[in-house]
Amino acid sequence: MPDLIPFAQWLRATPASEWINSSTWVWPLCESLHFMGLSLLIGITGFFDVRLMGFFRRVSVEAARALMPFALVGFAINIATGLVFLTGLPEQYVSNRVWWFKVGFIVLAGLNAGFYETRLSANVLAPDPHGETPRAAKLVGFVSLVSWFAVLYCGRMLAFIGDAF
Amino acid sequence: MTDLLSSIEGSTLAAWVRESPSIWAYATILTLHTVGLAIVVGANVVVDLRLLGWAKGIPTESLRALFPIMWSGFAINFASGVLLFMADATTKSGQRVFYVKLACLTLALLAARTISKRLRQPDGEAVPGDLRALAAVSLLLWAGAIVAGRLMAYL
């Protein structure tokens, strides 16, 4: 792990960080939005993941994927609000190993989704949209579901595990 | 009432939730409450967005399969919520925002139950106007429950 403490100390001294910490409403507002974002992200991605795993076959894979833009909205909300938290208390996050696990699971979920979109989606859609999904698709769905819940778990637990907070 | 709340807060179980250094006490219960939230609100979001007209390829009556998942998420949140309340009963019962959360939650669950009943009757191509309105109200109520729940840590 690179030494990010000097960067964290620099970030904490910026006016943006000062503003986040001096405001009474920025933190609770961003937390509320972060929870709405995770509901959008996990709800919609989870629905698609479960379909990829072979459940809900009355819904075609293509139809189950149609809500995915809302999952991306949720992800964007959570990146933005997450950056607010990081800017507010940079040292507490970068020195917390559970936070790095969280980042790792986000990367894993992203690579997994990228693999699906570039290598797999065409095979899954053909030939029968209501049929059994290939084993690779089941695995992708499972990895996605586990990764996003792991992101949530690490995010909530990072205040309790490790020594930063 | 105050006596009852104090004795709940003073119980061995409540003290364990609040004071145990174990990772399985407060930290895990709070995390389970967030896992349940993702399941409950996530499942509702899928149903509500479909009813509001997105992802028309999803047959509306197939959404019924999501309700058992939603209710199991709610079971997690009810159990973890009761424990979290017990740990801090006198403070939480005195918070106005706690009752706002309970009100949003109750109405959102009633909306979900009504929606799930309505989905038993197969409808035509278009989702009826009142069902769309209920879906929109459901989204707002869940957002309200989230904000109120978060504000309990601040107010």
Image (cartoon, coloured by chain):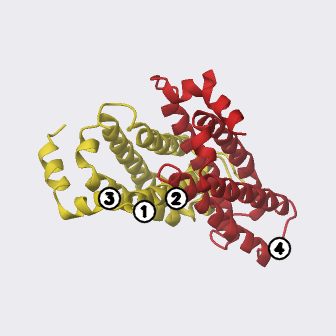
**Residue B112 seen from this side:** yes
Secondary structure beneath label 4: loop
Secondary structure beneath label 3: helix
Q: Sequence order check: which comes first, mark 2 or mark 1?
A: 2
Q: Colour of chain B?
A: red
Q: What residue type is labelled 3?
A: Val
Q: Which amino acid does label 4 sit on?
A: Gly
Which numbered disc covers residue A36?
2
* Classed neighbour count for the residue bearing mark 3: other residues with Cα under 10 Å, few (<14), some (14–19), many (≥20): some
Along the line of sight, the residue nearer the viewer: A118 or B74 = B74
Which numbered disc covers residue A77?
1
Label 3, label 4: how many angstroms apart (C-alpha)? 45 Å
Of the two numbered discs 3 and 4 in the rendering, the one whose residue sits closer to the viewer: 3
* Classed neighbour count for the residue bearing mark 1: other residues with Cα under 10 Å, few (<14), some (14–19), many (≥20): many
Where is residue A102? Give x, y as percent. 37, 42
The part of the image, by quadrant, that contains residue B122 is bottom right
Chain painted yellow: A
Say if mark 2 contacts mark 1, CB within 8 Å.
Answer: yes
